[in-house]
Image (cartoon, rainbow, N blue to C red):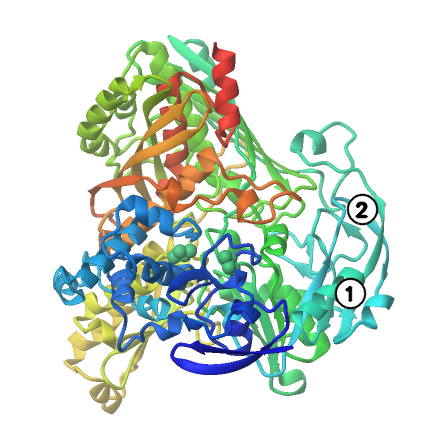
Amino acid sequence: MKEISLTINGIERKVMCTPDKVLIDLLREDLKLTGAKQSCDRKGQCGACTVIVNGKAVRSCLQKVERLEGADIITIEGLGTPENPHLIQEAFVLAGAIQCGFCTPGMIMTTKGLLDKNSDPTIEEIKKAFAHNLCRCTGYTKIIDAVQMAAQFIRGENSPEKEREKIGTEMIGESHQRPSAMIKACGLAKFSADIQLDNPLEVAVVHSTEYHAVIKSVDPSEAVKMPGVAGIMTADDIQGTNRIRVFVPDQPVLCEDVVRTLGDPIAIVAAETREQARAAAAAVRVTYEPLPVMMTPEASLAEGAYQIHKHSPNLCFTQPQTRGDAEKAIADAKVSVEAEFSTQMNHQAPLEPEVSVACLEGEGEEAELVVYGRGIQINAMAAQIQEAVGWDKVRYKEPFVGGQFGIKASIVTEAVAAAAALHFKRPVRYVPSLAESMLVTNKRHPFAMKIKMGADADGYFTGYTNEFVVDKGAYFLLGPIIPLRTLHMLSGPYKLDNIYGMAKLAYTNNASGGAARGAGPPQGAFAMECAIDMVADQLGMDKLEIRKKNSLRPGEAMSTGVKAEQWSFPELCDAIKPHWDRAKRDAAAGKTGGVMRGVGLGCHSFGIAEPGDNAQLFVELDPDDGITIYAAVADPGEGNDSMLTQIAAHTLGIPREKVRLYTRDTDKTVDMGPSAGSRMTYMAGGALLNALDKLKAVYKESGLKTYAEFKAAGKPTRFEGTKAVPGGELDPVTGQGPGYDSQVHNIQMAEVEVDTGTGEVRVLKITSAVDAGTILHRLNFEGQSEGGMDQGVGYALREEYVHGKSNDWKTFKFPTMQQSFEVEHVTREETRIRGPLGATGIGEMTMTSTAPAVINAIHDACGVWICDLPATPEKVKAALAAKK
Ligand code: FES
Ligand code: FES
């Protein structure tokens, strides 16, 4: 141990440290300065831990404390407070650069390090300074805007007051400050790993090292003797069903006799420190007897393949869809294409790794099991935990969440923490590493698609088929939802009277597929949009013209047979046409030398609010005549706090400050459905309006105006709000049936450069035309669109999760600011009939259309088709070589 003197946020401190102690631990664990975050496994890959040391922005996970004698350190907590924020913190809030906020403290400290030295940086200088700072939510555009705005503030050319004056007084359509933005900017928002519990145990999990095997024995004898170990538990110690059930109870909290994929949990080790727990977990000896390993549907669906689960064949779900006679229509077509497309398994990559914390509050059987996690449907998840661990009273609390993008529609670590808290009868923290988080969470499903498309001489589509097989991985999780969503939106924005789809879902020993931004339609749209370009090429037709020509019109049927009510896709085609014409000219002029320029389109009409969707919340009048909204609306970054606040303030004519939110706790809320599927604005916003209408009706009928008057007159002060979409399922034979309640329409136009020597693809610009109805908050709308585009480009070009190999942000190929691109928004706002104040959803739309736009642009640039995502330089280069 060595004593070190240093100054942190102006306070001189003497600290004791071991040689290996790093600054992030001193700050977060010892001093409880939790503003600096940890995303990567201290590999310097994420930048979330950035602080200022002696005037320089550094990653605190890379700084040995013993080398910091006399250092002057500033953390995010020392920069400013919500009452007195630093100009950089103001700029991040005002520029809309904060979504989940997990990267924000690191981004702000990097900005300080840059602007302290250079108060007028160029974009290239900004990109260089942020080379080690990752963000998954924003696509970096608004972060660059924030840095430039902060620089203007610092140079005295602009001020927060002037920026605030630009925000109008209307509640709807104006980009008012997000309620949670400033506490995130100041590092005060508490994420799961920031929660302090009284005398907690740290837990670590023994994971399967095999992909498929019988567990012959688990020997904890060495591990239990290790320092700090409080105990070790296995499946035998779980009182409940030991199954996390969404559709099918096939996923064990701890495996009993068989492991079905790498990383399956086998035992939990609890110890006084995380390091002790991890060391002991590594010492638990498990012996296995191997079973056949099937990593693809091809293997698991082969004749005689070993059955992975007893309750189901490996082909665990099928659903056809038929309208008209697609095969005949394609056979009779003037031109046709037949192609195979495949997409990779991908990680949703929220910047915050998995963390779950659990404790018992109260005594004996009356105690409440409180679980803190990152889930996005907290009431349903509390019920899953209750059943799995066998405890009646479960309360789920959701701290701030560092992004999720569908990954938290399923739980794993919460059940581990809950089981451990019950067994060891002490509060527990389960803080897996990033590598472990990647190993145990669900992923975006790989799709293998065989498609055919036909068109007549005028370019009208005559028929389309897509037969696709989905790699389910080891556990069912959300099961049919992803293939069904794909079929619901199979025809995209187009009129296709002859269409056939066949969805097959296959268990394998791969990582389990779950929800992921878009969840199904991104895969389906990739195949269809590339096929359209292939058809257009055969006909020599303009790619935008053929899309507009084939647009569905109101009154015509989608692939489910449901008739469109509103369909502004042709108008979107008109809106993007001048941009398309310009980009085509630029692409034509840019096909010289070894770097070829291309432009491509990707389109979709994305369903919002599935059949049977419903939402419920409560609004209560407060003593100061404001309101509190009790709604289980998770907000992992999309801006649901703005949405609820602005709708309520607008509807009641009260200041935003008088709208309070109680949204991330199962206590006092009921199930709202997940913060997924781009549904929260439509569903929760709709339920909120319903409750507010009831409150306003009482105002109107009674003439009462205040809480005091309501109380004196004995009037209720609490109002329920609901929104429901008519239910029903697709016919199991025809795939016809009720559809989504609303649509958001989108055209993405990607402009790329392809280096024909290296195969490198660079996205230069994306122009995004969207009609999502009324825009409630423009910066939030743009933030969702830009984040979706960034993920779409990553999906198209580089990201891939390989089970057992991808274990950090480098191996995953996380997109950085260096790869960010120019963005232009083209918006239409056709009021949606049943949308709250005319709005519908936006969260997943641009993720869905971006990948095909990029792949079509690559083809436009250099004439090769990359039908197997991602389009890595190696694949592009190989395709170019094959073309030669
Ligand atoms: Fe320091 Fe990731 S935790 S760079
Ligand atoms: Fe950057 Fe979420 S706001 S990771």
Find the distance from the CA under tag 1 to the CA under tag 2.
Answer: 17 Å
Does 194 appear above or below 729?
Answer: below
Label 2, residues with CA under 10 Å away: few <14, some 14-19, many ≥20: many
Q: Secondary structure at mark 2?
A: strand
Residue at the farthest front position? 70
Give percent across and percent down for residue 722. 36, 63
Which residue is depicted at the point 56% across and 60% down?
354
Q: Secondary structure at mark 1?
A: loop
Kind of residue indicated by mark 2: Ala
The answer to whether residue 718 is left or right of residue 514 is left
Front residue of 124/620: it is 124
Label 1, residues with CA under 10 Å away: few <14, some 14-19, many ≥20: many
Kind of residue indicated by mark 1: Thr
User: In the picture, which quadrant includes the N terminus?
Assistant: bottom right
The answer to whether residue 707 is left or right of residue 22 is left
Give percent across and percent down for residue 135. 41, 52
Q: Which residue is mark 2?
A: 213
Per the rendering, the mark at residue 555 is none
Q: Which residue is mark 1?
A: 234
Instruction: Give the image quarter of residue 768.
Output: top left
Which residue is depicted at the point 35% across and 20% down?
860
Front residue of 168/703: it is 168
Give percent across and percent down for residue 681. 33, 56
The answer to whether residue 566 is left or right of residue 64 is left
